[in-house]
Image (cartoon, rainbow, N blue to C red):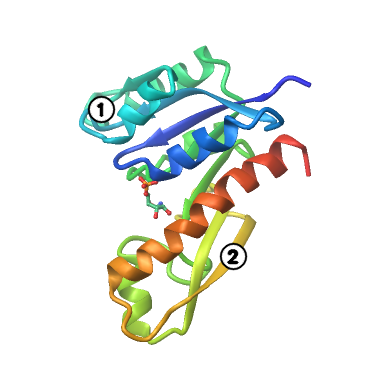
């Protein structure tokens, strides 16, 4: 069967992009990354795309027509599923509607708890003893779309933001390719 064509949108480090690249490298993986788009020219993740010989483009959110350009690039590449991976822009309701059920995100909390930014700082401040990560469909409401997969991660005594983020990130890297596999296999 043809592999599902993925477009990955990033803004920075790209460790989840790397997890998807690594996942797609397995011979039986039902998806492949055909395009990486960054809204930042200095995103470290761009080097990961290059190292994997995946076409990438930089489309600055400061350019007029930013979203239209992103949509055009995705369509031109024949993208079937868009994966947000540390993409730090909120997409418009119009864009989200056009990609309905074909646009997913990973968020470092057990949604619906702790949507938005500075997640780990807020989790620690709340005194919660567990957190996690969630892969979900993107809707117009921030971090609130239907959940595809999520997994719990303990908050441990003595955690600071970096330690907690690292523990959650290790799970993110497993969960994101797993969610893509489920969708690609229409499960
Ligand atoms: C991850 O924690 C992801 O859940 C969140 O932003 C971070 C991106 O990290 N949306 P990376 O760029 O994938 O390394």
Could you classify mark 1 by the number of other residues whose Cα lies within 10 Å: few (under 14), some (14-19), or many (20 or more)? some
* Residue 36 visible in the current orientation: yes
Q: Identify which residue is drawn at 63% across, 41% down.
A: 180
* Residue 141 visible in the current orientation: no
Q: From the image, which quarter does the N terminus lie in?
A: top right
Whole-percent x, y for residue 95 in the image? 48, 34
Location of residue 46 (image quadrant): top left
Point out which mark residue 151 bears.
2
Q: Is residue 108 left or right of residue 80?
A: left
Classify 76 as above or below 40: above
Q: Identify which residue is drawn at 29% across, 66% down.
A: 162
Location of residue 91 (image quadrant): top left
Q: Identify which residue is drawn at 33% across, 75% down.
A: 122
Whole-percent x, y for residue 120 in the image? 35, 69
Looking at the image, which residue sits at the far top? Answer: 76
Q: Is residue 183 left or right of residue 12?
A: right
Q: Which residue is mark 1?
A: 60
Q: From the image, which quarter does the C terminus lie in?
A: top right
Q: Is residue 82 left or right of residue 127?
A: right
């Amino acid at each position: 069967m043809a592999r599902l064509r993925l477009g990955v949108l990033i803004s920075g480090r790209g460790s989840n992009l790397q997890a998807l690249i690594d996942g797609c490298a397995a011979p039986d993986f039902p998806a492949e990354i055909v395009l990486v788009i960054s809204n930042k020219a200095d995103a470290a993740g761009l080097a990961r795309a290059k190292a994997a010989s995946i076409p990438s483009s930089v489309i600055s959110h400061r350019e007029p027509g930013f979203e239209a350009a992103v949509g055009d690039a995705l369509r031109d590449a024949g993208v079937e599923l868009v994966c947000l991976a540390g993409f730090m822009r909120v997409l418009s309701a119009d864009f989200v509607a056009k990609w309905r059920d074909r646009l997913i995100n990973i968020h470092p909390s057990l949604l619906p708890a702790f949507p938005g930014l500075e997640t780990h700082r807020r989790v620690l401040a709340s005194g919660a003893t567990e957190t996690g990560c969630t892969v979900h469909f993107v809707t117009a409401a921030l971090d609130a779309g239907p959940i595809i997969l999520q997994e719990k991660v303990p908050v441990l005594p003595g955690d600071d933001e970096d330690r907690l983020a690292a523990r959650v990130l290790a799970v993110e890297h497993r969960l994101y390719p797993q969610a893509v596999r489920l969708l690609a296999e229409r499960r």
